[in-house]
Amino acid sequence: MASFSPAVAGLLLRSIVIVIVMVGVLTLSANGLEFRVGGPRGWVEPTGNDTDKYNEWASENRFHIGDSLYFKYENDSVLVVNGQEYSRCNNSFPIHKFKDGNTSFTLDRFGYFYFISGTYSHCRNGQRLIIRVMGQPAAPAPEPTGPGGDDEPATHNPPPEDKPNSAATVTASGLLLVVALGFMFLVPGHLLP
């Protein structure tokens, strides 16, 4: 069995810890961020003049492949639809339909995702959302046709292109890496073998 000097053993231990931290960092960053749609209130029908609240929220964030949206709701549903079905609040032809009350939807590609409530009146009152997943060249969202057909303009605001995602500015994985590296180089050598 090989024997190591205390200096070599300490260096070996530090190297192993750095590798473990790096694997953890890569795992955390590959999983993406989870965004809770609607904040503490969840996925609910907007009240009053708050009909664009979900798209205003989306415009304040940046979404990437691997991020997920968490929808919390009661007596409702979440439908993933195309742009035309979004603008008409048409719940007849969803791409995906969820009604479990705790839906997590992973953003698995670049481009736009359109979400509506499965209850027509809720959608008409603003319970709908457009998400743009970053990674494609900056371009405006395809403008869905209005609720009355092609002659009536749509009633949503596409998300702006260059707003940073405040939730992603300082990630847990980046913070973990800085703390681990700081620990590795600040701990006196005599504390480690």
Image (cartoon, rainbow, N blue to C red):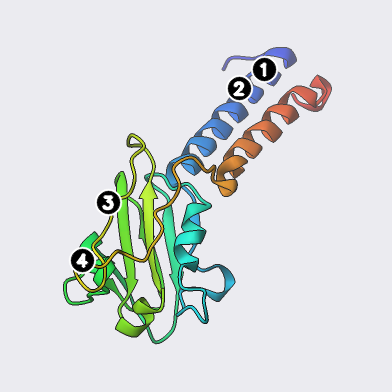
Disc 4: CA contacts within 10 A as few (<14), some (14-19) or many (>=20): few
Which label sits in the foreground, 2 or 3? 3
Residue extending furthest toward the left: 93
Q: Where is residue 53 drawn, in percent x and y?
A: 50, 67
Earlier in the chain: of badge 3 and badge 4, it is: 3
Query: What distance separates the C-alpha of mark 3 from that of mark 1?
Result: 55 Å
Q: Amino acid at mark 2?
A: Ser
SS under mark 3? loop
Residue closest to the eye, 43 or 101: 43
Disc 1: CA contacts within 10 A as few (<14), some (14-19) or many (>=20): some
Residue closest to the eye, 126 or 39: 126
Placement of 170 over or under 60, stated as above or below? above
SS under mark 1? helix
Which mark, by number, is residue 11?
1
Residue appearing at x 43%, y 60% in the figure: 69
Query: What distance separates the C-alpha of mark 2 from that of mark 3?
Result: 50 Å
Earlier in the chain: of badge 2 and badge 3, it is: 2
Say if residue 82 shows up in the picture: no
Which label sits in the foreground, 4 or 1? 4
Q: Where is residue 189 drawn, in percent x and y?
A: 80, 20
Placement of 77 over or under 106, stated as above or below? below
Residue closest to the eye, 20 or 28: 28
Query: What distance separates the C-alpha of mark 3 from that of mark 4?
Result: 16 Å
Say if residue 60 shows up in the picture: yes
SS under mark 2? helix
